[in-house]
Amino acid sequence: MSKQLFKKYSYDIALDEGVGAHLVSLVTGLMVFFVTLALVVNLGLSTITKNWVTGLSGTLTVEIKPPLAPAEGGKPSDREQERFDNSVQQIMTLLKGSADVSESRRLTADEIKNLIEPWMGQSAALDTIPLPALIDVKLVKNADASHLQSEIKTVAPSATVDTHTDTLDDVKALVNTASLFVFLLTGVIVLLAVVAISGIVRAKLLIHQPEVETLHLIGASDEYIAGQFRQHTLRGTLKGALAGLVCTFVTLLVISSVTHTLDTNIFSNLQLMPLQWALLIVSPLLVGSLIAHLTAQATVLKELSRLP
Amino acid sequence: MALVKFSNVGLRYSTGSEVLHDINFELAPGSFHFLTGPSGAGKTSLMKLLYVGQKPTRGIISMFGRDMSAMTRKTMPEIRRQIGVVFQDFRLLNHLSAFDNVALPLRISGLTEKHVKKNVAELLHWVGLGEKMECRPPTLSGGEQQRIAIARAIINRPKLLLADEPTGNIDENIGTKLLTLFEELNRHGTTVVIATHDEDIVRRFPHPQMRLEKGTLEILPKIQAKAA
């Protein structure tokens, strides 16, 4: 049985022998390592963006400026305070009654302080400065946000409504740029792999020229000879691609554990769907094999065309 | 109809002078010819043209009734499979066993492993190498390597068998056995051309000669007087 298996994978040309017999594995291993890493980063960024977009879209924040105090550190007049409270009350009533709103909630003073704290620190000033009223609003699906915005403005002209559009646009632009970079990087890596594999196959043709010529002269077609190189390159590619994949996942595990220790929470967001995992594993193998297959075929056929 | 026909064939390598000029001959099916001539006369070049390892610079070569200049690259292997060649340096693939070397033409032709095993084993026994099927060429003697080369050349039952200096590196006794083997193949219908500079062999085996002298060919009738 083992003899039969060996026969099945032996070549008429001694491609498994000599210098550079495993170069294809090395090149494709590196290619798959970098491309998979780039893919993981890209998929991770997409997931993070999706989470952010899902979290922020369909929401808006209404801010009602705090009543003005006559002097720094002083208390606002009763009239100003009453006007502020009325504005908040009117907006809350409007929101409760709006068909576009699924949920609305005024943030407590402590919640607002927690939001401001990263910028101002835990100073005592937080207790003395006037705090705005912030209302978190969740919209129903296909809500008319601009209509709601104008209604709020009618009720309380001083209120500002943040639909998070600018933030979302910035995040999307950043992720799109990163994706483009990853795409270009992948293209460059694939191109380099094609050039390298083509060079390796040409070198192998040169090394094994006498055997190739003999096969040619005893009636082997170009396709038969190319098939030998193709099969050898494909096997090398699969070995290299598998090794590259393993290295990628080990690297990701290491990065993930390091970032987990640092509490950066970046990789905890890289939760991929089963289909994405499958794509991540299968795509580099398929793409690598296809590239190796086509490159070996094209290179050998081109070189063989020089024989009579 | 001639099996091989050369009409006004000339061959020039690169920009050098012509090594073969106005070669005209026909090989009838089942014929046996020696290709003789001094070193440098162009024997190897003519053999290359015969085994389609080289294209002529001018003239028309017709093989098995087909004009070679009209053949496409895809149909060339089919022609080559009808020609068995015993190269002077044997050109065996050293990483393959004797069995796999002989099996090459059959596998290239796409025959099933069942056919390959039966035919190759039979032929290797016939040439006396039945016990050395799994040996690789570097472990065999020069004579044994030559027999593998011959077996590989005839395994496909070629219409045309070409041998380049087959008696060059072997003793007279083995040379005689070899020529007897070629004659036997010829009796079975294979057209044979043997390039040699061994005048003794030519005298002892009475077949017509194609004599090359300074790139031009002359057909000589067979020598009748066979050595005792």
Image (tube, rainbow, N blue to C red):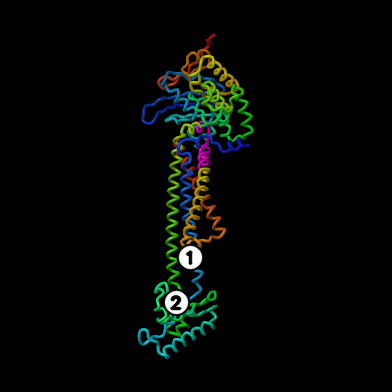
Disc 2 secondary structure class: helix
- Of A237 and B7, nearer the camera is A237
Tell me, for residue A49, which label it has, or none.
1
* Magenta stretch, residue numbers: A215-233
Which chain contains the residue that carries disc 1?
A
Residue for point 49% across, 18% down: B209
Q: Nearer the viewer, residue A3 or A188?
A: A3
Mark 2 residue type: Lys
Camera-side mark, 2 or 1:
2
Identify the mark at residue A262; answer none if there is no mark.
none
Q: Identify the main secondary structure in magenta.
A: helix
Across and down, in percent, residue A132 comes to 43, 81
A257 in relation to A5, above or below: below
Q: Is residue B176 magenta?
A: no
Q: Where A88 falls versus B39 (above or below)?
A: below
Q: Which residue is outermost to the left? A: A71
Identity of the residue drawn at 46% across and 86% down: A87
Mark 2 surroundings: few (<14), some (14-19) or many (≥20) residues within 10 A? some
- Outermost top residue: B228
Q: Residue A135 placed where, x, y %?
A: 48, 79
Q: Tag on residue A113?
A: 2
Q: Chain of mark 2?
A: A
Q: Secondary structure at mark 1?
A: helix
Q: Amino acid at mark 1?
A: Thr
The x, y position of residue A145, in whole percent, is: 49, 77
Asked whether residue B184 is in view, the answer is: yes
Return the x and y of residue A39 as percentages of the image width and height. 48, 56
Mark 2 or 1 closer to N-term? 1
Q: Is residue B113 left or right of residue A229?
A: right
Asked whether the viewer can see residue B72, the reply is no
Quadrant into which the N terminus of chain A falls? top right
Few, some or many C-alpha atoms within 10 Å of disc 1 (few <14, some 14-19, many ≥20)?
some
